Amino acid sequence: MPEKQNQILLTFIVPCYNVEKYVQRCLDSIFACGLEEDCFEVLCVNDCSPDNTIVILNSNQKSHSNLRVINHETNKGLGGGRNTGIREARGKYLWFVDSDDEITPDGFADALSKAMKDALDVLCFNYCRIDDEGKPLSKHIVFGESSVGNGFSFEKEVFQHGLVNHMGYVWRFLYRTEYLRCHDLFFPEQVHWEDTVFMPKSILLAERIASVSQVFYAYRVNPDSISGVFGKAYPAKSIYDFSFCAGWDLLRFSEEIKDNALRDSFKNIAIQKYINGFAIHLLRTSKKERKRFFGLIWERKEEVKSWKQYLNLINRIMLIPLFGPLVTDLMARVYLMKKKNGNKV
């Protein structure tokens, strides 16, 4: 266990929205992390939950003096909850924990000691997946024991210029609080896919980063979450955010990368997978959601003009007023027929 200090060593940032089914298990796992309670704090950000989440949080606050509850006056989304946590954190390090997930405490105290001893900006670790009841499904091992280096050398050593394929999942990292604040590393708010740029940027800007091989996080495969429906039918807002919010942010970020190969990798994935990615998601979703998507496009037509240069010909056609929705509906029927007949699409 890390040596006791006057300063709080770690802040767990737990954004909460409509998670009455899971949040108690999440908090129980945190309080079993192997640290004495005066060494850490739990910062729960209630993002206007309509269910009994706040009742559960308030009850835990009575039992644990190191748990703080902050209530948003308006819903700000997961990114907004995390941003509140970054601003309010008192710990030397912080850890983003989603309120429907859990942490696995074995060996974590030693990992925190390593982060402090090596004065790390970022400590990376592995995760496992659990089902809705908390039963283990699989381990996802990306990181081994590494030496301390800067973000670019770490990316080359660990990801071999493949960081672009591991974006998201900011809960796999322990961050030094002042490192995030000094670099103004915050999340976009009121959008899905809020960690698309945050994660790679937080890696590449680090002056001191290292990894350990242990598994410290348990990601719950929640069928009701955005990531839980990956590859299925997204709602219109999620499709828009994926392509034209996350994709655009990723493209702009790629221009900041000095390494040519890494820059080209990020740029290509931003254009091909994200910005042009709306098409396949439109084909998978309902006609009602497609109509909503085009409504968003027409509302923001001035922004759309700046994206068109990155769209392939078919996707440009799909965004033509009146004609585009008709073409998309026709393509969706063909897509669904092929899928029904068992063809690979």
Image: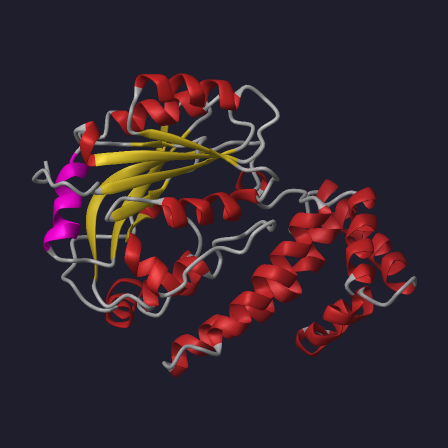
- The structure's colour scheme is secondary structure
Magenta-colored stretch includes residue 43: no
Left or right of 62 in this view: 252: right
Asked whether residue 216 appears in the rendered view, the answer is: yes
Q: Locate residue 293 relative to residue 38 in the image: left or right.
A: right
Total count of labels: 0
Q: Position of residue 302 (x, y in %)?
A: 77, 71
Give coordinates of residue 17: x percent, y percent: 54, 32
Q: Is residue 40 positioned above or below 293 on the image? A: above
Q: Residue at x 54, y 72 (%)?
A: 251
**Residue drawn at (33%, 68%), measured in percent from left and top?**
204
* Closer-to-camera residue (128/189): 189
Which quarter shows the N terminus?
top left
Asked if residue 87 lies left or right of residue 150, the reply is: right
Q: Is residue 345 visible to the viewer in this orientation of the structure?
A: no
Q: Nearer the viewer, residue 272 or 251?
A: 251
Task: Tell me where residue 137 appears, x and y as whole percent.
Answer: 38, 31
Looking at this rendering, what residue extends furthest in the right direction? 322
Q: Position of residue 193 (x, y in %)?
A: 54, 52
207 vs 99: above or below: below
Look at the image and give the residue range highlighted in magenta.
107-117
Front residue of 47/278: it is 47
Residue sitting at the far left: 3
Main SS of residues in magenta = helix
Residue 275: which quarter of the image? bottom right
- Residue name at image x 25 percent, y 42 percent: 10
Rendered position, 26 above or below 313? above
> Which residue is pictured at 67% across the width and 44% down the height?
234
